Amino acid sequence: MGYYSGLIKRKFKDVVGTRYETVQQEYHEFLPTEEELLPREIKKILFPLDISVQGVTDELCDLLGTFEADVSLMYITDAKIYAIIQDALSPQAGEDFRIKKEEYGTSLMDRIETCLEPRGARVHRRMFLGDKIEDVVRATNDYDMIVIPKTYGSHDPASGEVSAISMVLAQSVRLPTVVY
């Protein structure tokens, strides 16, 4: 018997009797296991970025620096928009779009790296055309934590609201998640 199960049984032994065991058996797939309740060691952090992300705060850099982890900055340019621009305008217009987004991505990653490296984080970079949700969800298998900018994937980052894409990612990823 794990520590938490024993604690709950002692706390509620006179209140619910055997009902706790019944609930535990019937809903075992929804209740966290002892291992899931233990804090996990954070060694690799995924940090997805796109055109809607403006930068990071010093507080976030301080937080990420406390883990002394590898932080992977992953800048994704939306492949669907790239394809639409190529089809609607011209292949050259699509390439111009991609180049402009990658220039912004390089500048953004430079600013974030400048903030993180003095605090002990080891920064790795990736930049590619892709799907902003599927590629991030697929990549999370290799990481211990994900940091999602609240404006990630937003069409109006100036609004300050959490974007729909950030909410979908935060709910679909089974990792410790920081939304800033």
Image (cartoon, grey):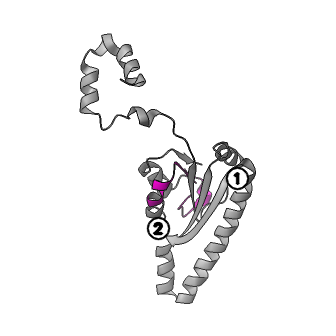
| Element marked by disc 1 | helix
* Image quarter of the N terminus: top left
Identify the image quadrant of residue 33. Answer: top left
Q: Amino acid at mark 1?
A: Leu
| Element marked by disc 2 | loop
For the residues labelled 1 and 2, say whether their Cβ atoms are less than 8 Å apart: no
Q: Is residue 1 left or right of residue 119?
A: left
Q: Amino acid at mark 2?
A: Asp
Q: Residue at x 24, y 25 (%)?
A: 22
Q: Which of the labelled discs sits on residue 116, or is there none?
A: 1
Identify the image quadrant of residue 74. Answer: bottom right
Q: Which of the labelled discs sits on residue 143, or is there none?
A: none
Q: CA distance from mark 1 to mark 2?
A: 26 Å
Q: Give the x, y percent position of residue 93.
A: 57, 86
The magenta segment? 138-161
Q: Residue at x 48, y 33 (%)?
A: 38
Q: Is residue 78 above or below residue 9?
A: below
Q: Is residue 9 magenta?
A: no
Q: Give the x, y percent position of residue 95.
A: 57, 83
Q: Residue at x 52, y 48 (%)?
A: 144
* Mark 1 neighbour class, 10 Å CA radius: few under 14, some 14 to 19, many 20 or more: many
* Mark 2 neighbour class, 10 Å CA radius: few under 14, some 14 to 19, many 20 or more: some
Q: Earlier in the sequence, mark 1 or mark 2?
A: 1
Residue closest to the eye, 84 or 6: 6
Residue that label 2 marks: 131
Q: Is residue 147 magenta?
A: yes
Q: Is residue 125 above or below residue 95?
A: above
Q: Give the x, y percent position of residue 63.
A: 66, 43
